[in-house]
Amino acid sequence: MLSANQIRARFGSDEGHFALIDYFLTNGCQILYAEDDGVLCFYHGIHAIYGASQTAITKCLSLVENSNCFVCSSSEEGDAVLQKFKNLKKKKACYQILYEKTIGVKIPENTVVKVLEPTDENIDFVTNTYTLGFSREEIKRLMTEFTFYASFTNGEISGYIGRHDEGSIGILEIMPKFRRCGLGAFLVDYSVKQLLEKGEIAYCNIEIANENSLKMHQKMGFYPSEKLVFWCV
């Protein structure tokens, strides 16, 4: 079985597309399969398969009895996952962006940034305002595990940003009356800065239907990997 460094050398040439696997390896995932024909690992309840040949897909999936979430590096891997695990109902294609630098987005006027502590009040606020509709339990878990940041404009929460289970930057929400003033770009850049200063991998996943997020990133000078990743949930 390949070591973590050998996996990086074998599969990590496209860093943007490899960001999730690299994050998993860096943070001590369980490596279930790692040969020249593909990789399978498990981290935080998520199975990830990468670079697998058709033969390796079969080998990898034979090692997993059940799964609640799979992320795949190709559509073919995703199709095989859905065929085996009937509890997984859909395959979501996502762009993946690896942030290697910050661009110094200026903070909007009358705005400050603070850590959004996981208090009951703040957990309720994020649960009630996050448009993707995560449960309170999910929001509480994420806010407890990762650092969330909130922007305050004139003393009022104008936006916030956090991270997902796979360590990607996300849970970005700007309150309606504060949109279109560059706050989303600022919070992304601010979050990236915090991670890079700690020596952590900073990356994100963007569903292909989320044109607003993709356009914002492109305007900032961040472009996704040419290859998509596929989430089976």
Image: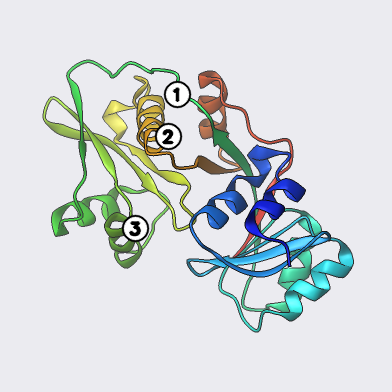
> How is the rendered protein coloured?
rainbow
| Residue at 35% over, 29% down | 190
Q: Is residue 22 left or right of residue 151?
A: right
- 174 relative to 154, above or below: below
Vertical placement of residue 209 versus 47, above or below: above
Q: Residue furthest bottom?
A: 65
Q: Residues within 10 Å of mark 2 (few under 14, many from 20)?
A: some
The type of residue carrying mark 1 is: Thr
Which type of secondary structure does the marked residue at label 2 adopt? Answer: helix
* Residue bearing mark 1: 102
**Whole-Å distance between the Cαs marked 1 and 2?**
9 Å
In this rendering, which labeled residue sits more in front, label 3 or label 1? 1
Tell me the residue that label 2 is attached to: 196
Q: Position of residue 37 (x, y in %)?
A: 83, 60
117 on left or right of 181: left
Which circle's residue, 2 or 3, is located before the other in the chain?
Answer: 3
Q: Residue at x 71, y 79 (%)?
A: 63
Question: Do the residues under discs 1 and 2 have CB atoms within 8 angstroms?
Answer: yes
Residue at 67%, 79% (x, y): give it: 64
Which residue, given by chain and number where applicable, does mark 3 sit on?
142
Three-letter residue code for mark 3: Leu
Marks 2/3: CA distance? 20 Å
Viewer-closest of 190 and 139: 190
